[in-house]
Image (spheres, helix red, strand yellow):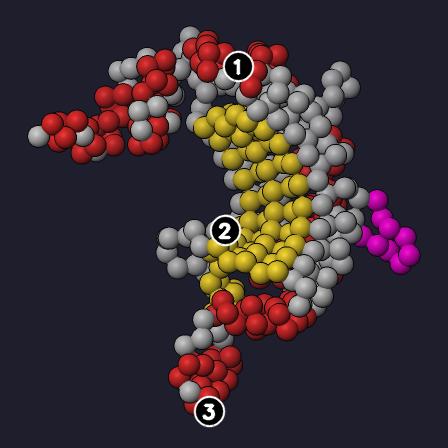
Amino acid sequence: MAAVECSVLDFFPENIMIDILSYLTPRELVRNSRVCKRWQRLVKDQRLWSSVSSRVLWSLLRRFLGRSLVCLHLRGLLVCVRRGVFLTEAWLHALSSRCSWIHTLRLTHTDLRGLHVIMLPQTLRTLELKHCEISAGFFMAQAKQAPPSLHALGLHSVPSITDLHLLSLHSVFPELVVLDLGDLLRVTALGLQRAFATRRSGTLQEAGSGLRELHLMARGRSRRLAPALAQGWVGLQTLVLAGEEVHLGLKSVGRLSELHTLRLRACSISLHTLTTCLRSAPHLRTLEFTDVQVVEDEKERTERTQMSEREGEARSTEDPELRVRQVVCTLLPECSVSFTRTHTGPELKTTD
């Protein structure tokens, strides 16, 4: 009976638990997050923090993190109770002065239209924006102050991002080596190519960026940016393709002469398409699949059926992943292959 009484809260639905936790102060929330993993997850719910003032937030940062803070993820609208404004210049200035070691900032569902990139901490090396709003001049260079020297930038589902923003990135962040673009509505493949792609024209190399790693993901109505790779990209060493960018991107892999790592995510792909890609890219050394389903087209299915009739049932039940490894071993003996499964949702769209 005592054991049941001690764990009675475990049977409460999460919505009720969040309602109970909403009566606690921010300091009490932080303390209760140490009870167990479930409570820690509940305390992170944005409904408990949506009305926390910047003064209380800074009190928590000083008390529990202080100058040891190196990575900060703000999810949801950061609202100040007294003034009703979003993330402010003063707040970012305080972040810079009080958290002098911070190098990664992730913002989700945040309004940045009244701010500029130069207001971010100078120690930042990685910036990720998801479902955020920015102004037309957010990335524009300004003479009064230099922006942080970003090495990695991620932009996902930021509706106001355009080709003009990408052109600004080239000049504002000359040390940028990793660019992650996903589900952008107003960015075009031509704009990406003009902003970052480096191409060889005859024996001369056209001026471009120092970008070494590119992530592209597209779903639904978002623009497809993989055609930016069609004319080559000098210096690009790592390419990550996800969703509906996979089919278009694989057609250009053979033109990326310095590419050594290819990662495919969240898609279905035929073995024939993959084989054609690998034959055009003998320079690949690492091939990674995450939530990728390898399927057979009609021709492959017919050939496998005929071979299974001659060689027995063992051939007909062969694992598709094993077939991929065999193809890679034959075409690219020095290339390593890995498969990772994390997707548990509906069936992924097939890439033929």
Residue 219 numbered tag: 2
Residue 36 figure quarter: top left
Amino acid carrying label 1: it is: Gly
The residue lying at 64 percent from left, 73 percent from top is: 330
The residue most toward the left is: 1
Q: Is residue 15 left or right of residue 291?
A: left
Q: Which residue is mark 1?
A: 66
The residue most toward the bottom is: 310
1 or 3: tag closer to the N-terminus = 1
Q: Which residue is mark 3?
A: 310
Residue 150 figure quarter: top right
The residue lying at 59 percent from left, 54 percent from top is: 263
Gap between marks 2 and 3 measured at Cα: 42 Å
Amino acid carrying label 3: it is: Arg
On whether residue 146 falls in the magenta region, the answer is no
Magenta stretch, residue numbers: 199-207
Q: Is residue 159 left or right of residue 345?
A: right
1 or 2: tag closer to the N-terminus = 1
2 or 3: tag closer to the N-terminus = 2
Image vertical order of residue 256 relative to residue 54, above or below? below
Measured as percent of width and height from the top left, residue 154 is found at: 59, 38
